[in-house]
Image: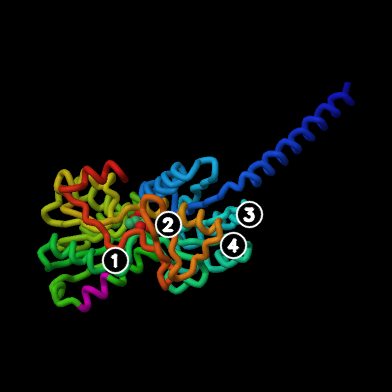
Amino acid sequence: MKRNRILAIALAALMLVTCCGLVATVSAEEGKIKIYFIPKNLGNPYFEALSSGFKDAIAELGEDKYEYIFTGPATAEATSQIEYVEAAVQNDADAIFIAANSNDALNGTFDDARDAGVPIYLINQDIPGSESHRDAAIMPVDFSTIGKAQIKLMAEQIGYEGEFAILSATTDAPDQNTWIELMKEVLANDEAYSKMTLVEVVYGDDQPEKSTIEMEALITKYPNLKGVIAPTTVGIAAACKVVQTRGLAEKIRVTGLGLPSEMKEFVMDGTCLGFQLWNPPYEGYLAVYLATAVKGGFKTEPGATFSAGKLGEYTILENGQILSLVDPMLYDITNIEEYAALF
Ligand code: RAM
């Protein structure tokens, strides 16, 4: 009796091993392209919008040809993504797309991944100063346009004078830090903004609660505050909520980079006069086409072009970047409903 049970267990185990072996072989034979997208952190609707672009392209190119894994840390600390990159490499990823939380904290991890044959693509941003550690970077727009565009928008909303603050994401965020530097440059060099004063840059860590607390603290600390630029979708929504709740829209103007679906209520009721962004799903869509091209032998070298379905041809720039769009778009009462329905 006992012996029979042992035999039965052994047989079941053997079947399981054979079966799993078979599954592994089948999926390798099918040659599925395994794509990872690691956002700064999970729980931010912005990255879900970006992720929807990956899914759109996969639906177009054939669900059976891809395995798409959207995974990442709960919070956006500099090193919180390392284990996710390592796990993707262990799991034989064909391509890793990552919105890194630091300019350089992942360099060693990226080097290890690339040594193991897994290409690393930055997405939604680059890693200034560490470009040699990645294969290419899919950008939402040309970042050099953002500083000027954001300061101009703020100026128009506060009448080109007065105190304003910046509510950012994390202190290490490569994208926000690039934009903030550009904003400071514009302020320092363009006479048009000489009567505007940047009083402080605060950090809400791309967490709604922390962003709310930072916004409230700014209002208390600077009684003459006329505006806030929040170049983060989490920050701008939190700042608008504070202004809306306190009925301060006429006194403090909030602008920045927002997600239309999260900003609709604030634009519709006049809390926010206008803000900017691009088209996050385009980035994910492009990413799938890029990974597919590379799998087919395409080399991500400057000047090389590849085709991305309905978005057309894209060229890898001299600096290894691919621009989804060039300039940011303005969202206001005239178009908010249209775009809020999309992302
Ligand atoms: C937040 C993130 C993201 C940034 C947008 C504008 O969702 O910080 O990286 O691109 O805002």
In what quadrant of the picture does the N terminus appear? top right
Closer to the observer: label 1 or label 2?
A: 2
Closer to the observer: label 3 or label 1?
A: 3
Q: In the image, what residue type sits under mark 4?
A: Ala
Q: Relative to 288, say whether 316 is above or below.
A: below
In what quadrant of the picture does the C terminus appear? top left
Q: Which residues are magenta?
A: 183-189
Q: Relative to 141, say whether 333 is above or below.
A: above
Q: What secondary structure predominates along the stretch shown in magenta?
A: helix
Cα separation between marks 2 and 4: 26 Å
Disc number placed over residue 254 in the picture, else none: none
Q: Is residue 191 left or right of residue 184?
A: left
- In which quadrant of this rendering is ligand 1 seen? bottom left
Cα separation between marks 3 and 1: 39 Å
Q: Determine which residue is flagged by label 4.
A: 113
Secondary structure beneath dot 3 equals: helix
Q: Determine which residue is flagged by label 2.
A: 307
Mark positioned earlier in the residue sequence (3 or 2): 3
Task: Between residue 151 and residue 57, name the one nearer to us.
Answer: 57
Q: Determine which residue is flagged by label 1.
A: 201
